[in-house]
Each structure stands twice: as C-alpha cells, then as structure tokens.
Image: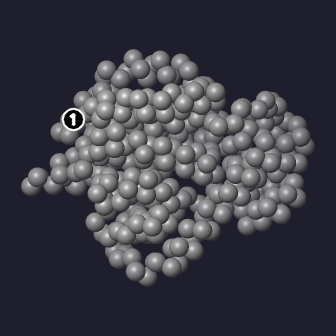
Amino acid sequence: MINQLGILLLDVTHLVASTVWASVKCLDTSYLVAAFILFWWYRRQPRRKTSSSFEGLHDSTCTVPSIVSDDLSYDSSLSDASEVNQPLTDPLWNVKVPSATPQERQRFYVGTKGDLRSAIHNLQQYMEWKTKHKKLEWEIRSSVALTGNKDIDDWRIAVAVAAKSRGETVDVVQVPQMGTTHTMMNGKPMKDREGNRIIHIIPGRMDDRLISLRTYALASALYMDQKMDPKTLECLTVLIDVRGGLGWRNPNGAQLLPFIQSTSSLLLSLFPERLAKCYVYPMPPSFEWVWKLVHRCLDPMTAEKIGVLTGPATIHAPPPIEAMEAYLDAEVIERLEAYRISFFDTGK
C-alpha cells in the first residue's frame, strides 16, 4: 500500500490545512474526495519484508484469498505452508482476542504484512471498539425509530450510536444516509462485474448542521461494520459519487476535511483487506493529470484497486456511463443514478 509516501502526504496536508485554509474552501468537493482515497491507503508503520510464501496470500481481485480452515491452518498446497501456518495458530491469539473469528485473524495478519504482534494488537483494538459501540447500541436501540428496511435501519442505528458515543443529540430520522448497499429488482445484493457487493457513497448528502462530520465518519464505520460478516473474507467495491444534489447541504472542500481525516483513519485501522475496488466518479477532467502522477507513486496492488472516472461533476451532469460499464452492468448504473436523483428536493 502507500508507505512512506503516505506519511509524507499526511504531513504535507496538515501543513496546507494550517496555512492556506481559506483557499481550500474554493476546492471542488471531488478533489477532497481524492484526498480521502489517498488517506485511506497510507500506512503508519514501515512495510516489513515478507517471504515469497506470504506474498502469495494476495491476488489482484480480492486482497485475501481464503486460506484458513476452522483451525486456522493454511491450505497444504501452499509452498512453505509450515512457515506461515505457525503465526495463525500462535496461542497469543486466543489469549488476546479469543472471540475473533479465523477470518478476522487472517485479515489483520495479512494487513500487517505478517507482523504477528501488530496484527494481534490491531485486532484487539478493533474488538474493543466493536464491543464498546455494541453496548451503546443495546442502550439506545429501543429509542431509535426503525422502518423495517434493514439498510435504512442499519444506518439509523449507526448514527444513533455514533452520536451517543460522541455526546451529540440527534434525530436520526433527519440525518441523510450518505452510504448504502443496494438490492436489485430480484432482491439480490447489487454487485459489480466481478461479483463484489457494492457500497454506494454520496458525500454531498452529508449535513453538518445535524451532526458533526466526525460523527458522520464514525457512523459510516459502524454502518460498514454491520454490512460485513466477520466469518468471511468478503471484499467490497466502494463507489463514491462526488456530484452534489438539489436541496442537499453539498459541503465544500474545507467542510469535508474533518470527515476525510476521521473516515480514512477509521477504515484503515478497522477494516484491513476488505476493499476489492474503489471507483470515484465523475472527477473533473482537469484532475486526470494529477491522478496519473499519483498513480505512478502507488504500489501496483494499491493502484489496481482504485479507479478514477472522469466527466462533468455538476449536479445535473450524467454519470460517466461509458467508463462505468467496464465495471458495472447497465442495470446497476441505472439504479445507482435513480437512487441519487430520488433524494433531490426540487422545491429548493
């Protein structure tokens, strides 16, 4: 992933934010979303050298092939299996994270490039984070207005828990849902052409007058956590539509910075090896040269997972259909756009 480059980008961004804050307000939302992608992938610790047998655990479609059985042993067909099997059967896992599933242990182990102690430490922090917020959910769930629609209810619960955790008061019914998983007409989950489930994110729907953007970030992480089965190695495709909408808050670049910082930090630490692909659209054509420059600096595995689709990014601009059809079926693209437009407030 992004190693020392990511740390450098973080330092530079902090400097820019403190010295040219006024100019950031003029940036298009799409540029800030691009920064979100970069933050998502940076690594705080140096990348450790791994053996060829460990590097074989990755593929280009989904970062973590299924290689664990119920007893955490690797597939015997892997070369040097004995070399990499021992860390996942280390007794320290059961001491520190006894309730973690084999798949969770594997994801965090792979996510730290085979650093056993870092993997256990990171997984322990995730389990503590999850337990803390699950307790809050038990406390407030009965007071949350639910609809019977699981996706909407998952979002409302996530918002209520996030607000409770951060000491904010909120009417969850009023908070726009900026991320969602879709179903198709046949009731099956919406997926990309590679068979990965889709999470659709529309940053323009966020309204910082209702909850802070840092609370939005926590709610987004809690929502995503509800969508992923800890007993699987499933990877998700994230679609980020940067266009604004009629009657939406449409936060500008400066307003989005706290959300970008908080969300990238949470996703990095809580969900290693869960991203199959991420497509950001439609990015202004003027951004294309910037992306090409950044793309060269990414390691191949990271670069392969991120796609930037260019096109007009105004409220009424159509999605970049031709580019999207390489990754999504036409019916999926149509439903994504219909969902976005359904939230327009034409009276404003």
Residue 166 percent across, percent down from the top left: 47, 63
- Look at the image and tell me in which quarter the N terminus lies: top right
Q: Quadrant of residue 228?
A: bottom right
Name the residue at 88% across, 59% down.
91
Residue 238 percent across, percent down from the top left: 45, 44
Q: Is residue 193 visible?
A: no
Name the residue at 22% across, 51% down.
248
121 to 317, vertically: above or below: below
Query: Of all residues shown, which one is farthest toward the right?
Result: 82
Instruction: Estimate how packed mark 1 is, as few (under 14), some (14 to 19) or many (20 or more) residues with alpha carbons within 10 Å.
Output: few
Name the residue at 70% across, 51% down.
122
Disc 1 residue type (three-letter): Thr
Please give the residue where the numbered disc 1 appears in the rendered image.
Answer: 314
Name the residue at 76% across, 46% down.
118
Q: Nearer the viewer, residue 339 or 332?
A: 339
145 to 38, vertically: above or below: below
Residue 72 left/right relative to 156: right
- Report helix, strand or loop for mark 1: loop
Q: Indicate how the structure is coloured in the image.
A: one colour
Residue 235 percent across, percent down from the top left: 56, 47
253 to 150, vertically: above or below: above
Query: Of all residues shown, which one is farthest toward the front?
Result: 19
Residue 231 percent across, percent down from the top left: 65, 60
Query: Of all residues shown, which one is farthest toward the bottom?
Result: 142
Residue 191 left/right relative to 300: left
Residue 303 left/right relative to 217: right
